[in-house]
Amino acid sequence: MNRPERTAPPTAAVPAGLHSMAVLRKPGRDVALLAAVQIVCFLMLMILEPRFFIIHLYQMIPYGAILLLVGYSLDRWAYAIGGLVSMVWLGLAYMAGLLGSAVERLRTPANSATTDILIAVLALATAAVAVLMTVLCRVHWVKEDTERRANRRIILLSSAMVCSYYLVLAHWFWDMIRDA
């Protein structure tokens, strides 16, 4: 019997709006959305704090990488890097007193300029996004089922990348503070 094989409809028959909708149904879209929000926050901080332009530009790199990783369906890598980058950033921001000073600025808005208040709001927003990203990356990591050996390799390599990234950031920041 010679039956014609069933194939998917040609892509030209599918409306253009449905192609973009398929991207929104990808597994890591929430992590990608949070990475995009972090990038926007750091862009706004670059404008508000021009003397830390390079630092904020550098802070966007891992979030851009997360967007690319999710876009190329390398979700496990995105979840590992996203969770680690966010946890370390939260730790460094807390140790440096950024979060405490942001809360203090918002408690006494009469003593602060509008720009300082906006910077404080953005600092707290990036902290909230970092907490949410850490939780979501962990949830997605647990949901996906892969072999243990591959998980260990991804975590070790991601940890090495995140550590080297933050060592460079800390070195630049320390040089900026020392020179000021």
Image: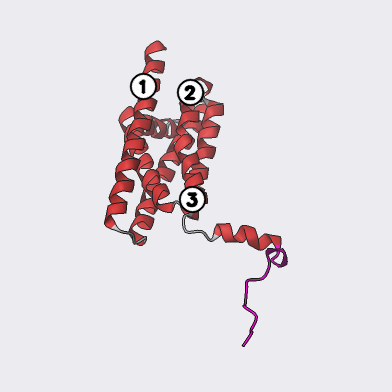
Q: Which image quadrant is residue 158 in? A: top left
Query: Which residue ends up furthest to the top in the rendered image?
Result: 179
Residue 103 vs residue 14: left or right?
left
Are the residues at dot 1 and dot 3 in contact (C-beta closer than 8 Å)? no
Are the residues at dot 3 and dot 2 in contact (C-beta closer than 8 Å)? no
Name the amino acid type tagged 3. Answer: Val
Residue 94 vs residue 5: left or right?
left
The residue pinned by badge 1 equals: 171
- Label 1, label 2: how many angstroms apart (C-alpha)? 14 Å
Q: Identify the mark nearer the N-term, 3 or 2.
A: 2
Q: Main secondary structure of the magenta part?
A: loop
Looking at the rendered structure, which numbered label has been put on residue 52?
2
Name the amino acid type tagged 1. Answer: His
Mark 3 against mark 2, which lies toward the viewer?
3
The residue pinned by badge 3 equals: 70
The residue at the point 35 percent across, 55 percent down is: 141
Q: Identify the mark nearer the N-term, 1 or 3.
A: 3
The magenta span reads 1-15
